[in-house]
Amino acid sequence: MARRRQVGKALWGAAATVAVVAGLLYAAIGHRPSFYPPSEASTPQRRQQAANFVQHSLQLRNDAVNEERWEAVFTQDEVNAWLAEDLKSQFPDLLPESIREPRIVFEADRATIALTYEEGWIRGVLWAVVRVGTGAENAVELEVETLRLGMLPLPDVLLIDWIKASPALPLSWTRRDGHVVAVLRLEPRRRGRTLRIDDVRFTEGRMRVLGHSETEMTAFREPAADPVLRIPQQSL
């Protein structure tokens, strides 16, 4: 009888431990970071900020195909307004159904990307801290320093699997110093010009993009003619 009581207490203790761990895990996953804003209804101000983002993007594209050097500055509010107002309607296949309400925070030399993740019983804010840089072959590199679901750290292999499973996003990946690096390769040519990204820089609340464009003659010079085939100028 005493032994049965001991077994019963052990089972209840194990069940209580599992319940506590499950509760802590659920609380950790459900934690909402302070930088991730709650859902809000559309407002005229947010729609205007989204329109500003579109206008600046179009201006950047026009400058890239018409000017030798170009740059653009996007504010955090403009980017988040466009994500809230236009992303789902204009690019419905860009994000999987389990992901919604992406938002971004610009800080010095890095950005925090956050979104709501829902898959089965799991629902929480998935967020990552990334450092931006420019790489070879006209690419923008996002080095992932932190990846969490709520307060719960996640293995970066999950991010790699998500990148592989998202063909709508033109991303590839590599690894550097133990961190996952998502690589976004840009279209190098437009209207006979080669576009080069020189720098992407984050500051408090802003993102700045700088680049230059080369004409085909500048970017791809024809090799010099063989000296044997040159026709010397005849003296008069």
Image (cartoon, rainbow, N blue to C red):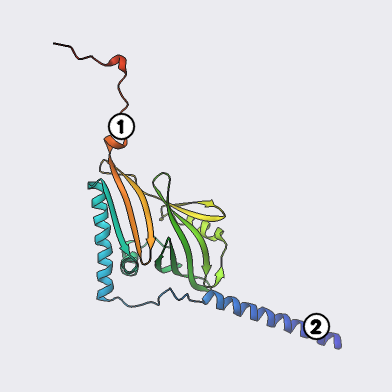
Q: Which amino acid, mark 1?
A: Arg
Which callout, 2 or 1, points to the residue nearer the camera?
1
Please tell me whether mark 2 sits on a helix, a strand or a loop. Answer: helix
Percent of width and height locating residue 113:
43, 65
Q: Quadrant of the N terminus?
A: bottom right
**Residue 30 rendering spot, x and y as whole percentages:** 52, 76
User: Depth check: 106 or 139 in front?
Assistant: 106
Label located before the other in sequence (2 or 1): 2
Q: Residues within 10 Å of mark 2 (few under 14, many from 20)?
A: few
Residue 95 at least partly seen? yes
Residue at image coords 24%, 51%: 63
Q: Is residue 65 left or right of residue 139?
A: left
**Mark 1 Cα shell of 10 Å, populated few (<14), some (14-19), many (≥20):** few
Above or below, comparing residue 109 to residue 43 in the picture: above
The structure residue drawn at horizontal position 35% and vertical position 49%, both measured from the top left corner, is: 197
User: What amino acid type is highlighted by mark number 2?
Assistant: Val
Splitting the image into 4 quarters, where does residue 169 fall?
bottom left
Residue identifier under label 1: 221
Q: Which residue is mark 2?
A: 7
